[in-house]
Image (cartoon, helix red, strand yellow):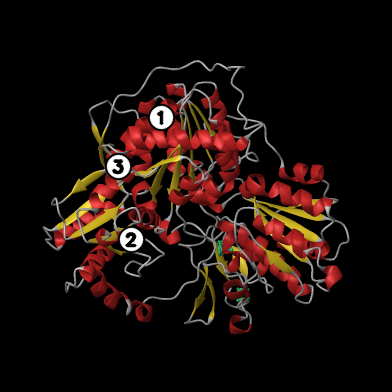
Amino acid sequence: MTGKAGDTVIGLGNDAIARGALEAGVQFAAAYPGTPSSEILGNLATISKESGIYVEWSVNEKVAFEAATAAAWTGLRAMASMKLNGLFVLLDSLVNIAYTGHGPGGLVLVVADDPFAHSSTAEGDARPLGFYSDVVVIEPSTHQEAKDIIPYAFELSEKHGVIVMVRETTRLAHSRAPFKLGKISRTLRTAKFDYGLPLHNLPRPHLRHGELHARLEKVRKEEFEKSPWNRYDGPAKPSLLIITSGIAWKYIREAVETLQLQDVGILRIATISPLPKALILDHLKTTTEVLFFEEVDPYLEEQIRSLASEMPAKTIPKFYGKLTGHIPNFGEVDINLAIKSIAAVKKLTYTTAQEEYINAASKAPDIVPRRLLTFCPGCPHRPAYYSIYRAIKRNKGKGIVTGDIGCYSLGVFYHGVMRNQHSMGAGVGIASGLGKLDQFGLTDPIISVVGDSTFFHACLPALVNIVYNQSKAVVCVLDNNATAMTGFQPHPGTGLTATGDVTSTVPIERVLKGIGFQSVSVVDPFNIKDSIDTVYKALNSEESQAIVFRRECALITNRQRRQRQEPTPVFKVDTDKCFGEKCKICSVEFNCPACVWDNESNKARIEVTLCNGCGVCVDICPHNAIYQVEK
Ligand code: SF4
Ligand code: SF4
């Protein structure tokens, strides 16, 4: 992060972006963790003190962007970073701040899309959302560009008074490649509030909209039509013009090289919005066929098809892409898809490596043991879900569980306990609605499961709604003391900041009490009996109920154990006491991956290489067959 100017280093795309922010002189950085964007702020946090930068994990992406706007308003360079889902959360503020402008500082928003939804619940495309929000959108294709584009984005933002969104996708964010370092800016600006510069759209928001469009038009004409970030490689009159952006450009270049096509041209557009219309039209005139190769949505394809309507009808090229079915309109693009797409349009015969691979991989299910996605051994979420599952069973199967986003989302695979999964906080909102349906005949108890970081991120309005509208829903907060799924970032309940400083803790149970939940219990999910009883009681209560299942993530426990050089407790099954096939509660019902089945003895066995030593199975076993081995 702090290497010398001129050095070449190997790092993630996210490392390059963080370094670019340092070189740009960023002084304020805020984010909410989300894969594949988290390392950007994580990196800046590690050097924030020595660099004089303020860095924070905000409670959600909207707040992160608003906090960054405040810094830009006072003249600083400020950056907010997030995954695509975070962009969905902040759209309302983004659209409004784009209208008002953000003061004299530079305001850059980095959004990481996740094509194929590797670590997301949905895939999406930030580019059309940036276009719709009237912000400038640029997209790097390489690690070097990811670093270099950040200082450029700040300059653009300050020069034209626009928000600049930098879009990246998973393969850039999370792949490693070399990039050359530039000079870190050591100039620290002083924050100054200009009382003559209010940021609002009143009394005529539509006029501000017009002014914003004029600023964007200036960016198009003065910056993007001749921008060196856009590039064309190929003959002056290509038989096929491929239009692409971002990481897809690398695949398409390799594909053209692999197919040894001399007559194909590649137009790489980095200035995504506003598009360089004149540049694109000039290229459309040179060819009769155009293939769009982009991920995720047909953004360039739709924009450029519409632009082509300005051409004389006879000169409009034939278009291929997602809209014509030549490229799938979902999922990630890759080198094999690039080869396949070009070969299809050019009517070439070419067998991609992928097809050979797919044939070989199709035989895998017969040889690889099947495993469901599940919680880690020792994870506190498993006993929490087990308690909910058992309490519902005791309640004659009555109890509808709504879910949320986090590692506890694996509850959908845990006996199908969790019934839905949408956006952050949505499970509480849906529970709030289900809990009001008794007048229409739905009298089943409603349980909403939510994680600790999600609790602060997006649940508070829905929780207030439950209390205010007296919805009959039991709220269960699975508090494992971290934003575990994205890399253990702290949150307001942990008492630590992004830079590791101790800060005020916001206790979840006090928030719930303060909102007005009549009964708030804190239970240890490892105490199975207590947990089941508490959930069962809540299901049958007339009062508004909240339960906080509190136990730190098993990975934190492990880490601490290693630091203290303590061994992991060892558990065993007494095969004389084990009921074998007639029981299987530990391995099947509780479903800890370390509780395995021994086919020779036909009894349960604890697999020590997997066991995390939580000891919950001791209480789960109804026949006292599991015991801790003495040290
Ligand atoms: S829960 Fe106990 S009795 Fe049942 S299979 Fe497991 S070890 Fe055996
Ligand atoms: S102690 Fe039991 S429940 Fe805990 S991880 Fe080991 S086998 Fe699983």
- Foreground mark, 2 or 3, reads 2
Q: Residue at x 39, y 53 (%)?
A: 303
Q: Residues within 10 Å of mark 2 (few under 14, many from 20)?
A: many
Q: CA distance from mark 2 to mark 3?
A: 18 Å
Front position among marks 3 and 1: 1
Determine crowd level at label 1: few under 14, some 14-19, many 20+ residues with C-alpha closer than 10 A. Answer: many
Q: Position of residue 175 (x, y in %)?
A: 32, 49
As displayed, is residue 590 above or below residue 479?
A: below
Q: Does label 2 or label 1 sit earlier along the sequence?
A: 1
Ligand 1, image quadrant it occupies: bottom right
Q: Is residue 117 above or below residue 185?
A: below
Which mark is on residue 143?
3
The three-letter amino acid code for the residue at tag 2 is Val
Q: Residue under label 1, please give it.
A: 154
Q: Answer whether residue 369 is visible to the viewer in this image.
A: yes
Q: Tell me which residue sits at (65%, 69%) in the image.
A: 417
- Of marks 3 and 1, which one's residue comes earlier in the chain? 3
Q: Tell me the quadrant of the picture where the N terminus can be found.
A: top left
> What's the residue type where badge 3 is placed?
His
**Amino acid at the residue labelled 1:** Phe
Spot occupied by residue 270 in the image (x, y as percentages of width and height): 32, 44
- Asked whether residue 139 appears in the rendered view, the answer is no
Secondary structure category for the residue under label 3: helix
Q: Give whichever of 608, 542 is nearer the camera.
A: 542
